Image (cartoon, helix red, strand yellow):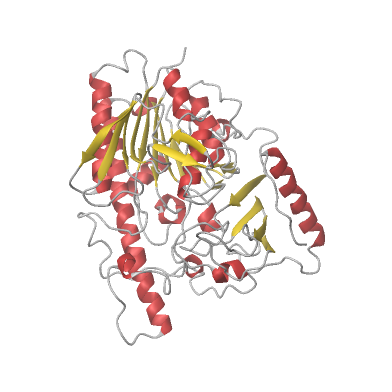
């Protein structure tokens, strides 16, 4: 019987693929993340199905779309009794399971929608997680085991280093206790807070990029023409960032152009400094695998919970179905099976993660999981009938932080169709604002317009394409048991 692999699942928060040198970044280098890509596979078309932290994390663990696992927004929590969850399957199969870092799926006893449940991590032999977002410096943690929460831990230092220290300590105990010899491989989730807002670099990276001029995004000066939801969003780097974000107030007397460039420079350098800290710490874990003799037997995954706007469209944050927010980095290394230095462009989603991880361990995915294993895809063998489109839905309509409109859509290899709607029928109610955006459609030709600047919806000659994409959108909604809203033509 083949030896079951260890599984090391590393996830950062808001790490855009275009800030990884293996993806051709124009602004930074990530040599340790590149080690994973160089010895394994880079996925070039991996997408989230709801670009916001809590829902995406729920989809990764459950293999379900967010409306199915009941974690649609940042305010929702994952019931720790919810089935399925990937770590529970691993644990029941004899794996040692651990979770360190950002959980962000709720804590303790919760009441949502009349339901009472516990939202602490479940299915992990050991867990040590940040409360909510956690702090960059001197963070506190909740501690727990399979039996539940066991206390709190106060620490001193930088969060990325501390989370890595905790994970390495757990791995050292796993090895010292002889679990490998007893066929008890590990399933370890190592989830970093960085590079989430407000982008506080570690002490070793705080001066990185000083004196450098950073390359501008192609769409930094987007005017949002033909895209009312984009125009209404409160995500512009020169208007909506705070002094806490950029650690200073802009100098007096700057022109509008100079002001925007000043904000971009302050933002992108701190963001990339946080990523440099992640890259350094990923290198520490990869070094442990080499030194312990576990590298050949460990499936290593690096990803993020979604993409992020790095000045793209003049924005920070995520939420939109636009490419820089939609695309997730996904680097996978498993020397026993995967060819080194390869790339795949089949369409993958975060809903597919859990079935894939289980497949590598020889474990069947629970029937309630909606995703499909992409293990053969990574090996270069795309199965017949593989998905040719991706379904996306963002539920947090017109919330006060970013004024981002609720929307759903379909993304194929060549096109994207999106419907923006107002969940609250006028955007009135708790936590909502009136953005002035009426429901409408967007249509993009991703081959002719990869930056999604030209909304083609309603233009002569697009009628057949629009009808085809609407039919595909309906098919996906039916497949994943989601309900459309009443749409305008």
Res 6 → quadrant: top left
**Residue at the extreme left:** 156
Residue 384 drawn at (x, y percent)? 69, 33
Q: Nearer the viewer, residue 241 or 426?
A: 426
Q: What residue is at 62 percent from the left and 59 percent from the top? A: 424
Q: Is residue 378 visible?
A: no
Residue 182 drawn at (x, y percent)? 33, 12
Q: What residue is at 65 percent from the left and 53 percent from the top? A: 409
Res 351 → quadrant: top right
**Residue at the extreme front:** 114
Quick check: 332 left or right of 443? left
The quarter of the picture where the C terminus appears is bottom right
Q: Nearer the viewer, residue 387 or 23?
A: 387
Q: What residue is at 81 percent from the left and 66 percent from the top? A: 461
Residue 359 versus residue 12 in the image, above or below:
above
Residue 399 drawn at (x, y percent)? 51, 60
Residue 212 versus residue 472 in the image, above or below:
below
Q: How many marks?
A: 0
Residue 177 drawn at (x, y percent)? 25, 18
Res 397 → quadrant: bottom right
Q: Is residue 407 visible?
A: yes
């Amino acid at each position: 019987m083949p030896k079951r692999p260890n599984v090391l699942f590393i996830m950062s928060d808001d790490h855009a693929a275009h800030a990884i040198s293996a993806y051709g970044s124009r602004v930074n280098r990530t040599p340790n993340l590149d080690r994973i890509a160089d010895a394994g596979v880079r996925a070039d078309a991996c997408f989230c199905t709801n670009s916001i932290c809590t829902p995406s994390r729920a989809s990764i663990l459950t293999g379900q779309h967010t409306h199915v696992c009941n974690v649609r927004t940042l305010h929702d929590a994952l019931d720790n009794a919810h089935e399925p969850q990937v770590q529970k399957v691993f644990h029941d199969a004899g794996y040692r399971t651990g979770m360190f870092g950002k959980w962000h799926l709720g804590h303790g006893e919760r009441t949502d929608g009349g339901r009472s449940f516990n939202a602490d991590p479940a299915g992990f032999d050991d867990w040590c997680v940040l409360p909510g977002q956690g702090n960059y410096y001197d963070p506190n943690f909740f501690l727990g085991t399979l039996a539940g929460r066991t206390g709190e831990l106060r620490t001193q230092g930088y969060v990325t280093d501390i989370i890595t220290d905790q994970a390495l300590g757990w791995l050292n105990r796993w090895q010292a206790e002889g679990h490998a010899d007893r066929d008890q491989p590990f399933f370890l989730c190592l989830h970093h807070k960085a590079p989430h807002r407000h982008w506080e670099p570690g002490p070793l990276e705080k001066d990185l990029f000083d004196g450098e001029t950073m390359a501008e995004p192609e769409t930094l000066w987007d005017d949002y023409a033909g895209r009312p939801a984009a125009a209404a969003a409160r995500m512009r780097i020169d208007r909506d960032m705070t002094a806490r974000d950029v650690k200073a107030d802009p100098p007096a007397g700057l022109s509008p152009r100079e002001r925007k460039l000043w904000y971009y420079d302050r933002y992108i350098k701190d963001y990339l400094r946080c990523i440099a800290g992640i890259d350094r710490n990923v290198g520490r874990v990869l070094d442990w695998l080499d030194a312990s003799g576990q590298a050949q037997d460990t499936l290593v995954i690096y990803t993020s919970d979604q993409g992020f706007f790095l000045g793209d469209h003049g924005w920070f944050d995520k939420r939109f179905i636009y490419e820089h927010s939609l695309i997730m980095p996904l680097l996978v290394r498993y020397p026993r099976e995967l060819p080194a230095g390869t790339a795949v462009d089949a369409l993958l989603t975060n809903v597919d993660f859990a079935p894939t991880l289980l497949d590598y361990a020889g474990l069947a995915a629970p029937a309630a999981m909606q995703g499909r294993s992409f293990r053969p895809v990574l090996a270069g063998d795309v199965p017949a009938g593989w998905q040719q489109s991706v379904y996306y839905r963002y539920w947090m309509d017109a919330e006060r932080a970013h004024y981002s409109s609720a929307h759903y859509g379909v993304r194929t290899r060549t096109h994207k169709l999106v419907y923006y709607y107002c969940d609250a029928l006028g955007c009135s109610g708790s936590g909502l604002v009136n953005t002035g955006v009426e429901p409408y459609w967007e249509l993009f030709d991703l081959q002719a317009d990869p930056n999604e600047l030209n909304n083609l919806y309603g233009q002569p000659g697009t009628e057949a394409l629009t009808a085809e994409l609407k039919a595909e959108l309906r098919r996906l909604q039916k497949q994943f048991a989601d309900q459309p809203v009443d749409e305008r033509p």
